Amino acid sequence: MAMIEVKSITKSFPVKKYDQAAKKYVKDTLTVLRDFSVNFDQEGVTVLLGPSGTGKSTLLRCINGLETIDKGDIIVDGMSVRDKHQLRKIRETCGMVFQQTVLFPHLDVMDNLTLAPCTLLGMSKKDAVERAKQLLDKVGLLSKEKARHNELSGGEQQRIAIARALMMNPKALLLDEITSALDPEMTSEVLAILENLASEGVCMLAVTHEMAFAQHVASRILFMDKGSLVCDASKDDFFTIYRKENERIASFLKFIGE
Amino acid sequence: MQVFDFAAYARFKWSDMRMILKAMGVTLHVTLLSLAIGTLIGLILGLIRCAKNPIVNKLPLIVMEPLRNSPLIVQLFLVFFGLPSVGIRMKAMQAAVLTLSLNTAAFFAVLVHSSIKSIPEAQWEAGYALGFNKFQIYWKIIARQAIRLLIPQAITLYISQLQCSSLVSFLSLMDLSKAGQQVAQKTMLPFLIFGIVAGLYFVLSFPLARFAKYLEKRIGFTI
């Protein structure tokens, strides 16, 4: 059984649309994901590619229960996201890192890392600090444990955010365009960490526009367009067969400079 | 000029000064009591304002808007002179504390609401994504950041309410400004007496302002 099963979900957002004839704004809905299904196993790195506004981030947010789905269901490790009581367990199973860095500004790095495991997993402070130190070492920021968020660069904050998600010992990491707000240097810093984690067998589900990441680290690539799945292929197939045969993918890759 | 007529200062007796100091106690009593009650009620109203339900979160406005949009002096008159005609009678002190408390609560609720709302949505999402529930996020993440925004504004409100408490002198309550008026009339030394009264208000409110600065530095982190 796949770890994450997305079963024909539909997700739409309420929007306002200007009605030319009536000369006023009317309520409308924007359907981002329509009857969307996909399965993820707990292995390797899956990269979600596609133009903006096709529902890649929305898919990740639905898996984590940050958005409620209109139709269908998502089963994470045997638990449904529709069951409010299991949401916490699901969020433990899938750690999430966002595009903007969201460290808690009132806490230093160490407390940022230990807050969740101490409160939610009942981990003792000592164990949590121990584990936090290991993870900080892994992301190369052991010296920054007493720093506040405003003393860290964007890349460093993002690395801390990854470590914070890993503190909960998740089975998979959901990464929502985590390098989009960073300059190329910091991006490579963060990607190096991800590559390391991937080689250690951490399962990741990443929305990204970093082709280098997709080419080096991904094992499977999903290409989405307009709320539906265009292609689901292994990395090698994607960059050889599909880029030649599928026009949409070819034009997307051309624009992204690949 | 009267100000340089030092012989006239002899009209200002020690007993007058004692009366002013006693009245300062009344001002402090009215202010502290109503600020404490007002803060508590305001906190509750402000938290209800942050509720998700669009009907529930408007309910506090029924109380808040009239209080925020009418002069305190009118509210005091309404409670002290108006309520007896519907059978609710209270002493000047009770009316003063009740009115000032509600008035403070209305303004404090706005501060609580705006402080909480100005914590970015992303902080909530980061909390949810880690598996916290709503109350844990409120307590461990949002409240601790919101209070940093709230404190300086709250103290500004407290200072202004301290000064507004002078309006209770219209309810024949012997507070600092009322005592000042009486002593000034009696001694015919308005410049000196009101100077002293102003100085005493300053003594009460200036440490509060410094305390705000201290707290701001103490809980020093930036958002």
Image: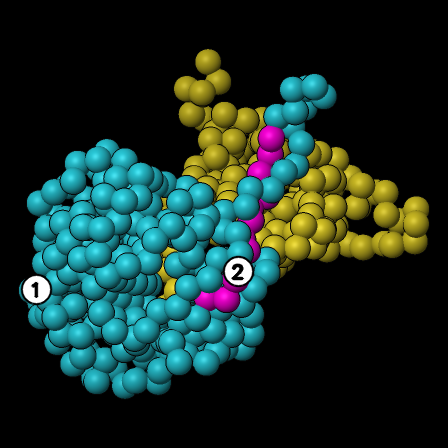
Residue A126 visible? The answer is yes
| Residue A74 in magenta stretch | no
- Left or right placement of residue B42 versus residue A215 in this view: right
Residue type at mark 1: give it.
Answer: Gly
Residue B74 image point, x, y percent: 75, 35
Q: Do labels 2 and 1 share a chain?
A: yes
Task: Please state if B154 lies on the left or on the right of A133 as rendered.
Answer: right
Front residue (pair A97, A199): A199
- N-terminal of the pair, mark 2 or mark 1, is 2
**Callout 1: chain:** A
The residue at which mark 2 appears reads as A9
**Would you place residue A177 above or below residue A25 in this image?**
below
Coloration of the structure image: by chain
- Which quarter of the figure has residue A172? bottom left
The image shows residue A91 at horizontal and vertical percentages of 40, 71
Mark 2 closeness class: few <14, some 14–19, many ≥20 residues within 10 Å: some
From the viewer's side, name the closer residue of A212 and B35: A212
- At a point 65% along the width and 24% down the height, the residue shown is A19
